[in-house]
Structures are given as structure tokens and as C-alpha cells.
Image (spheres, rainbow, N blue to C red):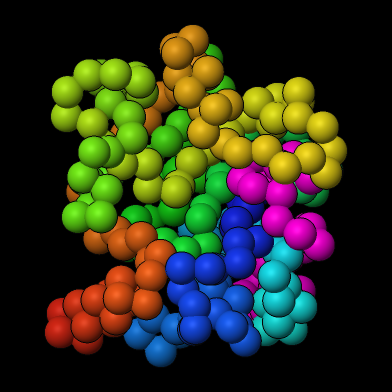
Amino acid sequence: MKAMILAAGKGERMRPLTDEIPKPLLEVAGKPLIVWHIEKLAKAHFKEVVINHAYLGEMIEAYLGDGSKWGLKIQYSREGSPLETAGGIKKALSFLGDEPFLVVNADIFTDLDYITLKNMNLDNFKGHLVMVKNPPHHMKGDFVLKHNKIELEGSNKLTFSGLAIYRPEIFEEINMESVAKLAPILKKLIDAGCICGEEYHGLWFDIGTPKRLEEINFFLKNNNFTS
């Protein structure tokens, strides 16, 4: 299984921290966010990783190189201007191949072992979402997880973690180089009963603002977290 890290966002809510550095290179516990993901993917025996980028993407390439430092092959999908999540994945499909692949948001932090996702069998489903307890900034949640299946409506909604496995055919109808959001596609597939999921109860942070970056660094420092 191949993996894709989504790293093309401008990080507007992270300004001024992202005025001169892309959000994936902001440090958590002394290490760039994206490196935490790279290390976890390598530890889970992934061999090929695709990273899309737009804003200050050359800095990401300069920092990570070809991935050989971690025993990986990194390929870059250069967008120029951000194509949103689904549009970015569509552009990168030529690197990802015909089999299901893992997608990771660069701006999350988690202690989930990615080997559990690498070994995932989708069976007849077209995608698999990792869900988490609703964080304070998103208490309404996104979707319902019922009997390992994702549903749109119901009680006890959970938040989509930014970790998922997708079949490439999900993105077939998107035009190349088009700006396309992921949410409408997911909702259509969920409504058709095509998406399964799981709830992760471990460590997970959505690092979308400078305050949340401070919070996770404080948390990790005070809990002696090590990779």
C-alpha cells in the first residue's frame, strides 16, 4: 500500500507562523509535523509516499528530499495553487496506482500505529475513515459510526481524523487540475453505504491554529511523550 500526505494548504489560520514556512514544517516537540508522519510510515513498512504541495512547497522538498533518509521513496505532486483535498488526490493518482492507498493530513498529530491501516482490508467498501472523539473546537462532529459503518445522520457523531484509506476510483469523475473538495464526495459515498470506519481512542490533535500548536507542545512536554 502507498501513502499520500496532504501538505498543500496555505495555513492561513496559522499566520504569522506560516508567513515564511509551510505549516507541515512547523515543529511539534522539536520535530516538523510532516516528519512525524514520515517516520510513522517508515516504521509501518510503507515504501512509497506521495506528498502534494503548493504554498512554499520547495521548502518541503528541500527538507525531506527523496525520502532515502527514512528508507522511503518520496514523490511530490506539485500543485502551484491548492486544488483542495479531492482535487489534490486526483492530480496525484498517477503516483498512487490502482490499489487502495492511505491518506494522511499533514496538520494532525497522533500516536496511531499506521501498520493497522496498512493491513486494512476494505472488502466491498470504497473507503475507510478513522474517527475520533469530538475536540473542543468541533463539538458537533462530522459523521456517525455504527457497526463499523459510516453514516451521515444520527446521535453521537464523531470527528473525521484526517486519516483514511481510499480506492482510486472514488476520484475518477474529477477533472484533472480542478479544485475539488472531499466532503461532497464522501457524503455521496456514505449515503450509498460505501464507507466503513473505526474509532481511535488514543492521542490525536488537529493542529489548525497557533494556540493548538502551543497546546500540543505543552501536552507532549508535560507527558514525556516520545516517538
Quarter of the image that includes the C terminus: bottom left
Quadrant in which residue 7 is drawn? bottom right
Residue 167 vertical placement versus 72 (above, below) = above
Left or right relative to 207: residue 1: right
Q: Where is residue 132 in the image (x, y as percent from the top left)?
A: 27, 45
Quadrant in which residue 129 is drawn? top left
Residue 221 vertical placement versus 153 (above, below) = below
Which of the pair 115/192 is nearer the observer?
192
Q: Residue at x 60, y 56 (%)?
A: 6
Can see residue 39?
A: no
Q: Which residue is drawn at 52% across and 53% down?
A: 104
Instruction: Please state the extent of the stretch shown in magenta in the rendering.
Output: 64-91
Left or right relative to 200: residue 31: right
Left or right relative to 174: residue 189: left
Quarter of the image that includes the N terminus: top right
Membership of 201 in magenta stretch: no
Can see residue 165?
A: yes
Q: Position of residue 204 (x, y in %)?
A: 29, 59
Membership of 90 in magenta stretch: yes
Q: Which residue is drawn at 76% across and 59% down?
A: 81
Q: Residue at x 57, y 36 (%)?
A: 182
Residue 217 vertical placement versus 155 (above, below) = below
Quadrant in which residue 61 is drawn? bottom right
Q: Position of residue 213 (x, y in %)?
A: 34, 76
